[in-house]
Image: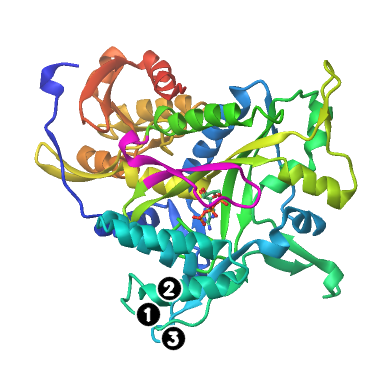
Amino acid sequence: MSNSDKKRVQSATLSPDKVMHKLVSLAKRRGFIFPSSEIYEGLSSCFDYGPLGSEMKRNIKELWWNSMTRRHQNIVGLDASIMMNPRVWEASGHVASFNDPMIDDKTTKRRYRADHLIENYIEKLRRDGKEADLKRVQSTYEAATSSEDLNRALYELILAEGIKAADTGSGDWTEVRQFNLMFQCNMGALAERSSVVYLRPETAQGIFVNFHNVRESSRMKVPFGIAQIGKAFRNEIVKGNFIFRMVEFEQMEMQYFVKPGTQAEAFEAWREERFAWYSSTLGINKEKLHWYKHDKLAHYADLAYDIKFEFPFGIEEIEGIHSRTDFDLKQHQEYSGKNMEYIDQLTNERYIPYVVETSAGCDRLFLALLADAYTEDTVDGDERVVLKLSPRVAPVKAAVLPLMKKGGMGERASALCDELSSNFLVQYDDAGSIGKRYRRQDEIGTPFCITVDHQSLEENTVTVRYRDTAAQERMDISRVREFLASQLIGQ
Ligand code: ATP
């Protein structure tokens, strides 16, 4: 690249609340994400992925799938059904206790998660350096979570500390109530108790109940993993923040079955690998990724960490890594009456494997990628919006643009586009000035613009413009396919 091709690119600084507003608007305008059933005023926390969004989501899922099943000989895939025998959810504990504590504000009529109100309050005390208050509230909260009357204990803590809602400043609280997050529906013609089925609230149970099917059919030996991508449904009390918290969302989960006693080692290896994946494969800025260790563990876990991302609205979870012990397989053994043990062929040892789970949310990750990529800058004084997505994640890999439609450039560009489209999603665009066409592609994150100009017809060359630097490079047409392929190779 010659120096004369270098452009002066200067990034603007954006306030976080403005970024969310701009992202939502860009996502709709350019066909990433639409509100669901919008012509009927939509449905709370449900969204549709548009033409570009569905491409980008497929890329994310494929990158995850490949990083699990292609890069690990001992991990295989599964696509279990969303509805399962309701006994599954009794065994897993979801019917009895997949609850969130909810509290209402009588004045503002807003609904909140009581645990979130307290946790945010604790975070604020920590930030403000109020050590004595922090210790007191933390220990009361810990005692409350293991109290017989959890609802009462949370309620009393909120009142005693005078905790208010951060968004309204109000604190006119009702009592705390437990709310089960599972969606129920009726199977068959009769709305009887026996016909109640649930929409799965997590994909993991489909993996546990298929443990022996997968192990036997694929001749897997412990340690091995089962990976699955699929929809999950939760009737969330507090919705919102665009696609961050939805009622219908997609999970990318992997359960890794290990010999009891070796779970800590497997946990550490997966913790490292999953954290690195976000920057090495997806190109997310490492600085915006954080670890959070759970002090308060779910009933099935002996260790749990979350990978969190700095969203414009705060640092929030995108993936959970949990050491789930042998809880789930044991429960299914008890409830189904089927033996869930594994027999080690070499040593003849029998045991119920322990499980290390990696559980990522595809939609939250999608939002993290958009937020990380959204940039406003000026190129040689011209303002633009650009999504600095990794080429692997970007929905459109390249745009092929004739400098002018006439003079044979349109035909040449369109032939190149056809040629590339068997391997990559490419777009042909001849409408408007070249500058406008670059801006359209910048805004949807297309990493390369390939321009066919006069010289192209004489020398069989094109210019390749790099999205982030706006620098251009001339290249032989025959090299373009190889060039694009080289930009998409991942770790
Ligand atoms: P949160 O505390 O934010 O409700 P969680 O701890 O209940 O999340 P998990 O049960 O560990 O979440 O689910 C694994 C992943 O699934 C999460 O890290 C997240 O990315 C995704 N996820 C969970 N609930 C939702 C939701 N309502 N909308 C979108 N993604 C979700």
**Image location (x, y in percent) of residue 90:** 77, 59
Residue drawn at x 79%, y 33% is: 214
Q: Looking at the image, is mark 1 or mark 2 nearer the viewer?
A: 2
Crowd tier of the residue under label 2, counting other residues whose Cα lies within 10 Å: few below 14, some 14–19, many 20 or above: many
Indicate the amino acid at tag 1: Gly
Q: Looking at the image, is mark 3 or mark 2 nearer the viewer?
A: 2
For the residues labelled 3 and 2, say whether their Cβ atoms are less than 8 Å apart: no
Crowd tier of the residue under label 1, counting other residues whose Cα lies within 10 Å: few below 14, some 14–19, many 20 or above: some
**What residue did someone put label 3 on?**
106
Under 8 Å from ligand 1: the CB of mark 1?
no
Magenta highlight range: 284-309
Q: Secondary structure at mark 2?
A: helix
* Disc with the residue nearer the chain's start (3 vs 1): 3
- Disc sitting over residue 460 in the figure: none
Residue 470 within the magenta-colored segment of the rendering:
no
Indicate the amino acid at tag 3: Lys
Question: In this picture, is 41 found above or below 83?
Answer: below
**What residue did someone put label 1 on?**
171
**What residue did someone put label 2 on?**
158
* Disc with the residue nearer the chain's start (1 vs 2): 2
The answer to whether residue 442 is left or right of residue 398 is left
Q: Secondary structure at mark 1?
A: loop
Q: Looking at the image, is mark 3 or mark 1 nearer the viewer?
A: 1
Q: CA distance from mark 1 to mark 2?
A: 9 Å
